[in-house]
Image (spheres, rainbow, N blue to C red):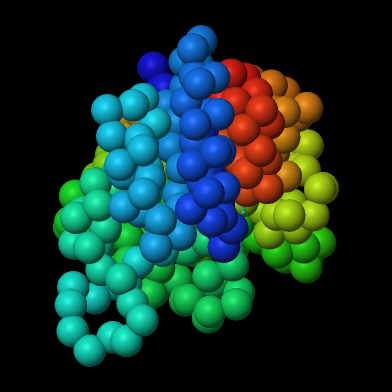
């Protein structure tokens, strides 16, 4: 049985004081949550979040990392550095990284490989833009994004990874994929992996992300191939995030 994973992606939000208040409220409301819960926070707050969440049921991680181990890469953060702060997870290939910072499928695959080599669990984000959906090439786009990782790391690597399907048109827009739309792409992803390794496919956690909120979480999280959520805006409000965690 796959355990649901609800992860907050705080993006570039938060202050020391806001983070402390948010996490205090989330920790106080965790009774009755069956899903695994995690938060992916901005780099400067990793030490704060580690101190706050160590020994709690909530895991933490980062939103990006370098594909390189160390060296002259000004402004970058390595997987080993994330390990120093007790991270379990790291997002790789979030659509904002791909679209705004030009991360290619190849770079994302290299980050995924570097994360796993350091013992971190990558949350590999995939998803199509609105144009791509309208052109009916969602499966080609998501398939291509997955193939880059499969080509570099192989299907067995997915035994130690999470996939997040995030349609770009649903991120931060308030437009959520319908449960049927999301389920169809999740089933496509699992089917593609199943063709390579059925056991890996059965155990693979595939999250949905894109305007998931308290009001639509249950109908999304009860789809057969949706194993959790990657939550942006709603993860910044304790009551909303907890409601999604409880729906999982
Ligand atoms: P929203 O939940 O704000 O749409 O963001 C989703 C997302 O990008 C999570 O990574």
Q: Position of residue 143 (x, y in %)?
A: 52, 57
Counting from the top left corner in percent of width and height, residue 72 is at 22, 89
Query: 213 above or below 166?
Result: above
Up-down relation of residue 90 to residue 49 (above or below): below
- Whether residue 191 appears in this view of the structure is no
Quarter holding the N terminus is: top left
Q: Position of residue 109 (x, y in %)?
A: 35, 66
Q: Nearer the viewer, residue 103 or 132?
A: 103
Q: Is residue 189 left or right of residue 150?
A: right
Q: Residue at x 62, y 20 (%)?
A: 247
Seen at 38% across and 45% down, the residue is: 49
Q: Position of residue 58 (x, y in %)?
A: 39, 31
Drawn side of residue 105 relative to residue 244, left or right: left
* In this picture, residue 155 sits left or right of residue 141: left
Which residue occupies the extreme top position in the image?
32
Q: How many marks?
A: 0
Tell me what residue is drawn at x 35 percent, y 53 percent: 46
Q: Nearer the viewer, residue 218 or 146?
A: 218
Q: Which of the 4 quarters of the picture holds residue 55? A: top left
**Nearer-the-camera pick, 23 or 32:** 23
Question: Residue shown at 18%/73% (left/top)?
Answer: 69
Residue 240: tell me if it is visible. Answer: yes
Q: Quadrant of residue 127?
A: bottom right
Q: Residue furthest toward the front?
A: 17
The answer to whether 41 appears left or right of 137 in the picture is left
From the image, which quarter does the C terminus lie in?
top right
């Amino acid at each position: 049985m796959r355990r649901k994973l609800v992860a907050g992606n705080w993006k570039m939000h938060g202050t020391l004081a806001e983070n402390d208040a948010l996490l205090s409220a989330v920790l106080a409301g965790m009774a009755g949550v069956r899903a695994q819960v995690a938060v992916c926070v901005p780099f400067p707050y990793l030490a704060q979040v580690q101190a706050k969440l160590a020994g709690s049921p909530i895991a933490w991680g980062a939103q990006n990392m370098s594909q390189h181990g160390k060296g002259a890469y000004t402004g970058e953060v390595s997987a080993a550095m994330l390990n120093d702060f007790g991270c379990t997870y790291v997002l790789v290939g979030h659509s904002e990284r791909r679209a705004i910072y030009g991360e290619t499928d190849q770079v994302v695959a290299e980050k995924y490989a570097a994360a796993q080599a350091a013992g971190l669990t990558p949350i590999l984000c995939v998803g199509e833009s609105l144009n791509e959906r309208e052109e009916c090439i969602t499966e080609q786009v998501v398939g291509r994004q997955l193939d880059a990782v499969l080509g570099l790391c192989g299907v067995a690597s997915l035994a130690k990874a999470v996939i997040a399907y995030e349609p770009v048109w649903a991120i931060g827009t308030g437009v959520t994929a319908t449960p049927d739309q999301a389920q169809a792409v999740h089933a496509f992803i699992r089917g593609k992996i199943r063709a390579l390794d059925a056991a890996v496919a059965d155990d693979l956690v595939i999250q949905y992300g894109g305007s998931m909120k308290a009001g639509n979480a249950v109908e999304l999280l009860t789809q057969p191939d949706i194993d959790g959520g990657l939550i942006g805006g709603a993860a910044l409000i304790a009551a909303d995030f907890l409601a999604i965690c409880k729906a999982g």
